Amino acid sequence: MVQDMQRRLTLTELRAKLGNRSRSAIYEDLKKGRLPQPMKLGGRLYWGEDDVEAHLRARVVKGGRYD
């Protein structure tokens, strides 16, 4: 069995990765499907770094924008 060993991003790390987008902008992106949904671990939200990267690459290929 292969375990999922991808790095987990906190909201702060995700914001930095996306050019310091505001917390409210991140949640709006989630609502509109512009970011993958986070996982909840121990009461905190985390995003798989590989999941975020793949999602962003797919948006670029489709010509998606972050407005």
Image (spheres, grey):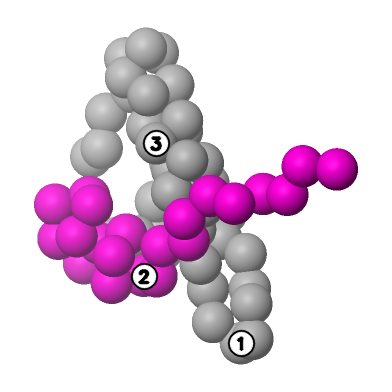
32 or 53, which lies in front?
53
Q: Amino acid at mark 2?
A: Leu
Image location of residue 49, percent across then percent down: 43, 48
Can I make out residue 39 in this image?
Answer: yes
- In the rendered image, the residue lying farthest to the right is 1
Image location (x, y in percent) of residue 9 = 41, 62
Task: Establish if 28 lies above or below 44.
Answer: above
Q: Is residue 12 left or right of residue 29?
A: left
The outermost residue toward the front is 1
Circle 1 — which element? loop
Q: Residue at x 36, y 70 (%)?
A: 11
Q: Which label number is shown at residue 53?
A: 3
Quadrant where the image shows the N terminus? top right
On residue 11, which mark appears? 2
The residue at 64%/77% (across/down) is 41
Give neighbour class at mark 1: few <14, some 14-19, many 20+ (Cα, 10 Å): few
Q: Quadrant of the C terminus?
A: top left
Q: Could you tell me the amino acid type at mark 1? A: Gly
The residues bearing labels 3 and 1 have C-alpha atoms spaced at a distance of 24 Å
Q: Which residues are magenta?
A: 1-22
Mark 3 or 2 closer to N-term? 2
Q: Position of residue 48 (x, y in %)?
A: 51, 52
